[in-house]
Amino acid sequence: MALNHGGRDGSSPMRRAERPLRPRVRSSLFLLPAWFSPSSSMRAAFHRLRGVRLGRDVEIGYFVVFDNLYPEKIVVEDGATITAHCAILAHDESAAYARDGEEIVRETRIKAKAFIGVHSVVMPGVVVGERAIVGAGSVVTRSVPDGVTVAGVPARDISRKPTG
């Protein structure tokens, strides 16, 4: 992490993420082809070239953002589906920018056969369990157990419980 002298109010230094040039170039170079490729398999191939760890038969929608700074910290297991316009994050710089805190960098994992609905955000360090479903537009701030359905901001368990 680099230190940028002169915070927003000029009084304290601001911390900013800093990565070696090679992984940043690799991640950036393949980003647009990953977004605009006409098939899910091509999008997955370009995201793999960026460093994202994708399993077999993964479905990737258009304009999916796998963390641009740390794509190698994203794991998507076999058969998972990430629909259009989702963001799967592995780092969070908000505390570093707003409060001179530390940048958070954690592996984020989408387990086998999980489904992430359109326009959802999965925050750093979250594990979405096997066959779990994340409803459209959700912000997932905590790990989701296997087979559970979550939705909302922040995402909460909305699974139907058996009655009787």
Image: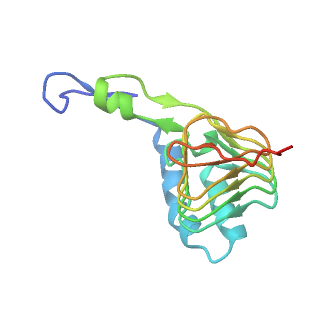
Label count reads 0
Question: Which quadrant is the N terminus positioned in?
Answer: top left
Percent position of residue 53, x then y: 70, 47
Picture quadrant of residue 96: top left
Question: Which quadrant is the C terminus positioned in?
Answer: top right
Taking depth in this image into account, of 30 and 64 the one nearest to the observer is 64
Taking depth in this image into account, of 153 and 35 the one nearest to the observer is 153
Percent position of residue 112, x then y: 80, 49
Percent position of residue 38, x then y: 63, 78
Give the image's coloring scheme: rainbow
Taking depth in this image into account, of 142 and 102 the one nearest to the observer is 142
Percent position of residue 139, x then y: 53, 46
Task: From the viewer's perspective, tell me whether residue 98 is left or right of residue 7.
Answer: right
Whether 110 is drawn above or below 57: the answer is above
Q: Residue at x 29, y 30 (%)?
A: 98
Among all residues in the image, which is located at the extreme bottom?
A: 38
Q: Residue at x 53, y 65 (%)?
A: 63
Task: From the viewer's perspective, tell me whether residue 56 is left or right of residue 10.
Answer: right
Among all residues in the image, which is located at the extreme left?
A: 10
